[in-house]
């Protein structure tokens, strides 16, 4: 008889192995899915994971895109991981990402066509505040009325999407767009364009902010008393209360951090790769960042590596659609398998398999 026996403490070995095992199982299951779709599985896996980096025809374009895609994923995932460490489940980062983009873009467009060097920093502040304010709604509702932050933050995503549609169709719509929805193109406005800092690298201010967030999160969680309070709240809530840690302050702090970073990701994206506020501006980064956070084991360095891996699946998935004709939904399913297999294999971190004889009555 096979049964699961709880470990006395989580296994460090399995903590490291489960992300690698999840990636391997995702490749196997994804290969089977591609084969059922009538596509060569090995070629599909190679196109997703190898060709974007080493294909002689596509690598020169794909490599810079790796940082472009990874930047917002890492930035949002870092913020989410801080809350997840404290047992605070912010599932609405997509909405905070949207509101950061809308608020930052609105501030910039209010000063059009200014060439002031202070305009872009002002937009960055507005973007961070927009994401923070949107995250404060579930934070205050939870601390004052005990609502569930999962449901509130998730429902606010759909509110943010409607605000985005309204902004791009009316009050932020470009007067030179011939009536089509969408704001002015920030790429044509040098004062606010989030351009590459180093040519042909994909490195822009959003990537720099993501790297700073990784370092800051590591210092906070590993070297600061507030990081200890966050971890204590998540691992032992009763002990945290006995130690004088205020749950309400931790909730506001964690949701504030995650909202701010998601808002910054939205601002850097709308002024950089996206270029303008459009109805379909949101690309699911807020939800994909949840996978990145858990694949990185909620550790800043792990999230950095997981973000690069997930960005690789984005770029490789687009390449596979182009080269092999794979449907876009199959690539999304392939990405979702990562979280599924990670959660499945994560059982072995806290449990071990035991074989025992069936007892006879």
Image (cartoon, rainbow, N blue to C red):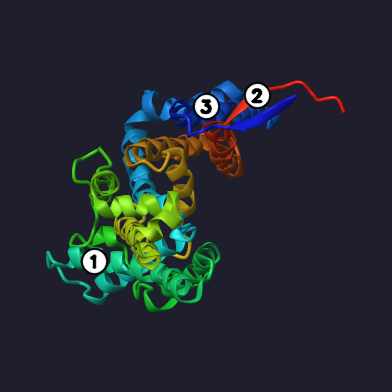
Q: Nearer the viewer, mark 3 or mark 2?
A: 2
Q: Which residue is pictured at 22% across the width and 73% down the height? A: 112
Q: Is residue 281 visible in this depiction of the protein?
A: no
Vertical relation: 117 (above or below) 74: below
Q: Secondary structure at mark 1?
A: helix
Residue 21 lies left or right of residue 32; in this view the side is left
Mark 1 highlights which residue?
125
- Quarter residue 309 falls in: top left
Mark 2 highlights which residue?
354
Numbered tag placed on residue 11 in the rendering: none
Vertical relation: 230 (above or below) 167: above
Q: Residues within 10 Å of mark 1 (few under 14, many from 20)?
A: some
Q: Which residue is pictured at 36% across the width and 66% down the height? A: 252
Distance of label 3 from label 2 (alpha carbons): 20 Å
- Quadrant containing the C terminus is top right
Q: Residues within 10 Å of mark 3 (few under 14, many from 20)?
A: some
Vertical relation: 141 (above or below) 241: below
Q: Which residue is pictured at 35% across the width and 76% down the height? A: 175
Mark 3 highlights which residue?
21
Percent of width and height locating residue 189: 22, 62
Distance of label 2 from label 1 (alpha carbons): 54 Å
Residue 38 lies left or right of residue 149; in this view the side is right
Q: Is residue 115 visible in this depiction of the protein?
A: yes
Distance of label 1 from label 3 (alpha carbons): 40 Å
Q: Residues within 10 Å of mark 2 (few under 14, many from 20)?
A: few
Disc with the residue nearer the chain's start (2 vs 1): 1
């Amino acid at each position: 008889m096979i049964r699961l026996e709880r470990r006395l403490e989580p296994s460090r070995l399995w903590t490291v192995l489960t992300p690698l095992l999840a990636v391997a199982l995702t490749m196997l299951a994804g290969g089977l899915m591609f084969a059922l779709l009538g596509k060569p599985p090995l070629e599909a896996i190679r196109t997703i994971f190898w060709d974007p980096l080493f294909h002689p025809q596509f690598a020169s374009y794909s490599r810079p895109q790796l940082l472009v895609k990874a930047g917002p994923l890492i930035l949002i995932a870092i913020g989410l991981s801080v809350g997840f460490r404290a047992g605070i489940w912010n599932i609405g980062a997509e909405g905070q990402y949207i509101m950061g983009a809308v608020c930052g873009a609105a501030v910039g467009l209010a000063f059009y066509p200014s060439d002031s060097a202070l305009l872009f920093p002002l937009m960055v502040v507005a973007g961070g505040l927009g994401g923070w304010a949107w995250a404060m709604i579930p934070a205050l509702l939870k601390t004052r009325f005990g609502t569930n932050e999962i449901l509130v933050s998730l429902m606010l995503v759909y509110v943010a999407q409607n605000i985005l549609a309204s902004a791009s169709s009316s009050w932020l719509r470009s007067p030179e767009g011939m009536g089509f929805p969408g704001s002015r193109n920030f790429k044509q406005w040098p004062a606010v364009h989030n351009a590459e800092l180093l040519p042909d690298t994909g490195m822009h201010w959003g990537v720099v902010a993501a790297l700073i967030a990784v370092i800051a999160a590591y210092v906070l969680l590993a070297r600061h008393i507030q990081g200890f309070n966050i971890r204590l709240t998540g691992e032992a809530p009763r002990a945290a209360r006995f130690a004088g840690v205020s749950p309400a302050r931790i909730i506001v702090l964690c949701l504030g951090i995650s909202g701010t970073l998601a808002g910054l990701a939205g601002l850097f994206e709308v002024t950089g790769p996206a270029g303008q506020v459009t109805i379909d501006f949101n690309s699911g980064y807020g939800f994909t960042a949840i996978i990145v956070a858990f694949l990185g084991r909620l550790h800043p360095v792990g999230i950095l590596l997981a973000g690069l891996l997930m960005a690789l699946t984005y770029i490789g998935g687009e390449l596979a659609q182009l080269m092999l004709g794979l449907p876009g939904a199959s690539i999304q399913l392939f990405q979702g398998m990562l979280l599924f297999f990670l959660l499945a294999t994560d059982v072995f971190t806290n449990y071990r398999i035991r074989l025992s004889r069936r007892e006879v009555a």
